[in-house]
Image (spheres, rainbow, N blue to C red):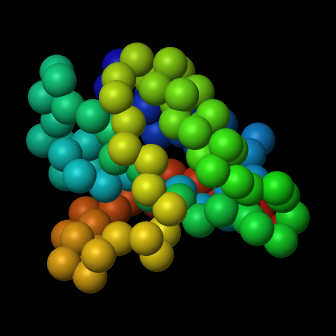
Amino acid sequence: MDRYQIIRIIHDYMSRKPVLKAWIFGSFARGEEKAQSDIDILFVPDFEHGSFTLLTHGGMYEDLKQLLGREVDLVVDGSLRPYAQESVERDKILVYERVS
């Protein structure tokens, strides 16, 4: 599965969830992925218009892992340590944004 197929799957999936925005980052965003690379996804939950809980997060993780056929790292925006946030900001590519 190439990067564009992965982006399409993530976009379509996030459009059905309580999510405002989602980005990929890391090796897939840089085009440096290997066969064993996981897919790093950063997202902004929609707390106002959807019920978002730890259970929701876990379900999304399992769904995306199955849909993408790879391990995923599903990270809520704002939860990263400052040193990691800098790296993510350099790499991230927007793959989904809810349109009002």
Looking at this view, name the residue that lies furthest to the bottom.
82
Q: State the image coordinates of residue 7 (x, y, percent, origin top left).
A: 47, 39
45 displayed left or right of 82: right
The quadrant the C terminus occupies is bottom right
Please give left or right for residue 55 compared with residue 8 in the image: right
At 13% across and 28% down in the image, what residue appears? Answer: 34
Residue pictured at 73% horizontal, 56% vertical = 52
Instruction: Determine the image quadrant of residue 21.
Output: bottom right
Q: In the rendered image, which quarter is residue 46 located in?
A: bottom right
Q: Is residue 52 visible?
A: yes
Q: Is residue 74 above or below residue 20?
A: above
Between residues 68 and 79, which one lies in front from this camera angle? 79
Total numbered labels:
0
Q: Kindly tell me whether residue 14 is visible in this rendering.
A: no
Residue drawn at 82 percent across, 56 percent down:
51
What x and y, as percent, mark residue 61? 52, 36
Left or right position of 69 against 46: left
Residue at 58%, 27% (x, y): give it. Answer: 63
* Residue 99 position within the rendered picture, expressed as x and y whole percent measured from the top left: 76, 64
* Residue 92 rendering spot, x and y as whole percentages: 33, 62
Q: Quadrant of residue 32?
A: top left
- Towards the viewer: 83 or 93: 83
Which quadrant is the N terminus positioned in?
A: top left
